Amino acid sequence: MTIYFYKVNQPYGCFSNFSPHGIHIHGQFWPTVEHYYQAQKFVGTNDEPIITVIHGVKTPEEAASLGRDPLRKVRPDWEDVKLSVMRAAVLIKFLTHPDIQAILLETGDRLLVENSPTDYYWGCGKDQTGQNHLGKILMSVRQEILQRLTGSI
């Protein structure tokens, strides 16, 4: 049975990058995975000062809005690194928070799908034809954590 997730206040909402589960990464605390991910778009660019602003906003919605500003130029390697940036942050999130790690592990080997009606890259999109990269990352993280726990790495 497929598990669909999307909004933070719905079942499996902790799988969302907007969930209030902070991460420590590269010596800094970020309030959500979304804050961290959006900020990483500007590392080494002329727009790098926006990283501090993204870090300081109160909500992941605000972080997403700043990170998606079409007037800002993302780093030239962004398309090459964005999946690994996201995976690293998601892994740390689930290693850091045992409560949601348990929820992730309880999904067993079920397919995880971000049920976003608008996102065809990270989610499945309105017509379920999207690439579901967030779901794939979560399933990969689930497998890695399981291997770590069973000592089978």
Image (cartoon, helix red, strand yellow):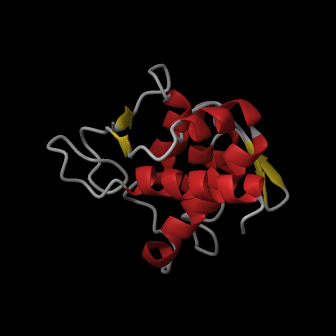
Q: Is residue 54 depicted above or below 72 in this figure?
A: above
Identify the residue shown where x is 58% and y is 56%: 143
Q: Residue at x 25, y 42 (%)?
A: 118
Q: Nearer the viewer, residue 71 or 14?
A: 14
* 86 or 38: nearer the viewer: 86
- Residue 123 falls left or right of residue 85: left
Q: Decide: is 49 above or below 11.
A: below
Q: Quadrant of residue 43?
A: bottom right
Is residue 68 shown to the viewer in this render?
no
125 left or right, relative to 7: left
Q: How many marks?
A: 0
Quarter the C terminus occupies? bottom right
Across and down, in percent, residue 113 comes to 36, 43
Residue at 50% in and 67% down: 82
Residue 87 can be seen, yes or no:
yes
Decide if residue 99 is on the left or right side of residue 84. right
Q: Nearer the viewer, residue 141 or 59?
A: 141
Horizontal side of 59 relative to 79 (left or right) equals right
110 w.r.t. 91: above or below:
above
